[in-house]
């Protein structure tokens, strides 16, 4: 019986969680200014390419090191 009650409580929580945990709406892309005055995207338009390229290169080097040690 305890197992069934625990199951019902967990199920009720999982069904109610999306209603309780509502996210906020994102901010206006231009900070509330007029649309013609530099419409920047949400997040400030910062590039992610530099860090992403570095992480890809480091990951490939780490994988190559693991393969080299495995064959050795």
Image (cartoon, grey):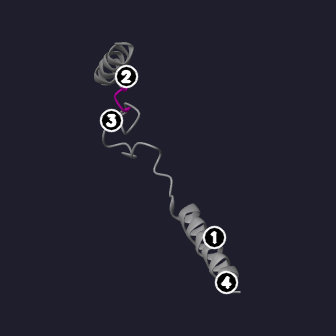
Q: Earlier in the sequence, mark 1 or mark 3?
A: 3
Question: Which residue carries the number 2 mark?
Answer: 21
* Residue occupying image coordinates x 38% and y 13%: 2
Q: CA distance from mark 1 to mark 3?
A: 42 Å
- State the quadrant of the C terminus: bottom right
Q: Please tell me whether residue 71 belongs to the stretch shown in magenta.
A: no
Question: Which residue carries the number 3 mark?
Answer: 34
Q: CA distance from mark 1 to mark 4?
A: 15 Å
Question: Which residue carries the number 4 mark?
Answer: 68
Please state the horizontal and vertical placement of residue 11, each as a whole percent of the image: 31, 22
Q: Marks 1 and 3: which is nearer the front? A: 1
Please state the horizontal and vertical placement of residue 16, each as a whole percent of the image: 30, 19
Q: Which of 23/33 is in front?
A: 23
Q: Which of 67/29 is in front?
A: 67
SS at circle 4: helix
Q: Earlier in the sequence, mark 1 or mark 4?
A: 1
Q: Which of 32/34 is in front?
A: 32
Please state the horizontal and vertical placement of residue 71, each as a whole percent of the image: 65, 86
């Amino acid at each position: 019986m305890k197992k069934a009650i625990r199951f019902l409580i967990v199920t009720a929580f999982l069904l109610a969680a999306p209603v309780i945990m509502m996210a906020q709406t994102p901010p206006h892309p231009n900070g509330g200014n007029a649309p013609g005055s530099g419409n920047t995207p949400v997040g400030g338009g910062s590039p992610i390419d530099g860090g992403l390229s570095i992480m890809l290169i480091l990951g490939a080097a780490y994988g190559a090191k693991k393969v080299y040690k495995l064959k050795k």
